[in-house]
Amino acid sequence: MTDSPDFYAFEDLLEPEEIAIRNRVRAFGENEVLPRINDYWERAEFPFELVPKLAETGVVGGIIEGYGCPGMSNVAAGLVAAELARADGSIGTFNGVHSFLAMQSIFLLGDEEQRERFLPAMARLEKIGAFGLTEPQHGSDAVGLETSARRDGDSYVLNGQKKWIGNGSIADFVIIWARGEDGAVGGYIVENGTPGYEATVMTGKTALRAVWQAEITLTDVRVPVENKLANCHSFKDTSQVLDRTRYTVAWRALGLATASYELALAHALEREQFGQPIGGFQLVQDKLARMLAEITSMQLMCWRLSKLADAGRMTAAMASLAKMNHAAKARAIVADARDILGGDGILIDHHVARHHADMEAVFTFEGTDSVQALIVGRAITGLSAISGRKPDKR
């Protein structure tokens, strides 16, 4: 099993159980994902064969306790996110959508009957989940979503559109966020095959090509009353899910950065030019040293953030600070790795090209760099610079 950079003895901060979980996921990434993923990525096809193998790792459901979920620490869940991304960003995204966005929505905002009905099969990956928030006209301002939900007897009738919905075309359950007749946002569990639900796989992506995002059209989709998340009463409740999952994106950025650094270092020691390994040149060593410095700081920041989450002290702004910092730093690290590999850096066989492309998506999703900065800015100044929010949006 490959060792990751650990310049400041980061592993000393981890509990034995957390190390065991990390190693299990790392083995899955190295033995199952890496030998297969480039071909799927290049063909833009989802690797269904990896789904049962991911289930066997026992990490699906992350920090959720009970219902067949592992109930791991936030540190362990972060390590899982990092290791999956270290192998492949698409697989990391699949699990992030399923285990965190979809399953956490049901766990946090559903009632006991809903948790018992949906979560155990999702924990076994017998059923796949998706999270339908983003709309064609509402990305960063998701609070302005226009999808509607109208009560009609023992059902709700949903109409609207969604975009960029990971797993949306393959999911058994899609949580659709819609605005009710009272103007409040609620979550509605739409089951696969429901009449009026149409999901089209988005094509032409240059990042995360091995995971499918969908454009969704909802035309008079009838959802049973018992499929409305019982404890979701406003967009603030939806934000709870986003706040609880955003920290894992910082870990995923760390995973992509780590993989790229490892590949660049190995290449620098093997590739010879002008009679010596290129790792012996000052310019290359400078890049590697700065990459390692950023990865080390990212490791420590991720660990501290997750420990705060374990203690119930993590705030939305804390998660945003980590996502903002790590996505930008990882983006630079991956770019330097591609540069060190030279021409090989754009060949998918060497993996860095895939990480380089995928990092562009991580830089944007679950809150762009600019929006994260404004969330942090609001926390440190007490003044909101985010415009366009109407007071009647709930």
Image (tube, rainbow, N blue to C red):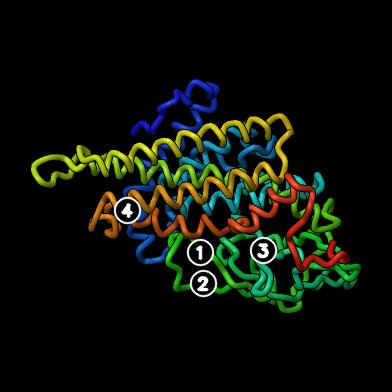
Q: Name the front one of labels 4 and 1.
A: 4
Q: Residues within 10 Å of mark 4 (few under 14, many from 20)?
A: many
The amino acid sitting under disc 1 is Trp
The amino acid sitting under disc 4 is Arg
Q: Is residue 138 above or below residue 125?
A: below
**From mark 4 to mark 2, how far is it between C-alphas?**
27 Å
Q: Nearer the viewer, residue 158 or 270?
A: 270
Q: Residues within 10 Å of mark 2 (few under 14, many from 20)?
A: some
The amino acid sitting under disc 3 is Ser
Q: Nearer the viewer, residue 351 or 391?
A: 391
**From mark 1 to mark 2, how far is it between C-alphas?**
7 Å
Residue at numbered disc 1 = 212
Residue at numbered disc 3 = 140
Please state, as top left, top right, bottom left or bottom right, where the C terminus lies in the image.
bottom right
What secondary structure is found at the residue carrying circle 1?
loop
Q: Is residue 348 left or right of residue 201?
A: left
Q: Residues within 10 Å of mark 1 (few under 14, many from 20)?
A: many
Q: Earlier in the sequence, mark 4 or mark 2?
A: 2
Q: Is residue 46 left or right of residue 64?
A: left
Q: Earlier in the sequence, mark 1 or mark 3?
A: 3
Q: Name the front one of labels 1 and 3.
A: 3
Residue at numbered disc 4 = 338
Q: Residue at the spot x=52%, y=56% of the render?
A: 363
Residue at numbered disc 2 = 202
Q: Is residue 261 left or right of residue 62?
A: left
Q: Residue furthest left?
A: 275
Q: Residue 332 location, x and y as percent?
A: 42, 51
**From mark 4 to mark 3, how far is it between C-alphas?**
30 Å
Q: Residue 62 location, x and y as percent?
A: 61, 39
The amino acid sitting under disc 2 is Met
Q: Are marks 4 and 2 in contact (CB under 8 Å)?
A: no
